Image (cartoon, rainbow, N blue to C red):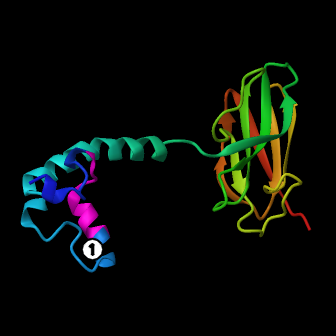
Amino acid sequence: MLAACAHVAPLRWQWPLKMILQLQQPFRTRPFFAANASCRASPKQTRMAMLKVMPLAALCIITTGCSDTCGNDVVSRKTSPDGQREAVMFQRDCGATTGFSTQISIIDAGDKLSGIGNTFRADDDHGIARAGDWGGPWAEMKWLSPDRLLIRYAAQSRLFEQGNHVEGVEITYQAVSLR
């Protein structure tokens, strides 16, 4: 039986046979497997092949679906007057299908920036808001005291996050009309 099916790879190394048949059938003038009925997989063999491949497929989906493929480029860092905290403005770039965003995080002095902004997040609403030199919408920040921060931003920006109290700091916002 195996000799008649020499063109078929061993079942344990094949993709689920149903998927192969669905993908290959439109491109062939003859069935994927030889006309010999003994070369066709039984329903049990198909189920077994699918059970072997499904954990690998699930693992691939989980690991690639949960990864953060975005990059952060720091635009400016401002240390609070008491030196305890830093306000970090950065541009976040998540690839060709998204625009740049301007984000601000308040972190303890000396800590590393990671992830999304915990204080302010905005984009230029598809080019409507004025962009800063870094590509995202214009913004600036200024410490008013050790526990008060002023964030000014382009009025036409599309806002996603505007935290009023973060890490013990009170944040005030001011939309600025720029032309």
Q: Nearer the viewer, residue 10 or 143?
A: 10
Q: Which residue is mark 1?
A: 25
Q: Main secondary structure of the magenta part?
A: helix
Image x and y of residue 79, in percent:
85, 27
Nearer to me, 146 or 15: 15
Mark 1 residue type: Gln
Query: Residue 119 at what x, y percent from top left?
Result: 68, 40
**The C terminus - image quarter:** bottom right
Q: Which residues fall within the magenta stretch?
A: 13-23
**Image position of 77 (left or right of 158):** right
User: Mark 1 falls on what kind of element?
Assistant: helix
**Residue visible at 70% across and 45% down in the picture:** 120
Q: Is residue 95 above or below residue 120?
A: below
Q: Is residue 131 left or right of residue 94?
A: right
Q: Residues within 10 Å of mark 1 (few under 14, many from 20)?
A: few
Asked if residue 1 is positioned above or below residue 62 in the image, the reply reads below
Q: Is residue 36 magenta?
A: no
Q: Residue at x 72, y 36 (%)?
A: 105
Query: Considering the image in quadrants, where does the N terminus appear?
Result: bottom left
Q: Residue at x 77, y 48 (%)?
A: 173
The residue sitting at 31% across, 68% down in the picture is 23
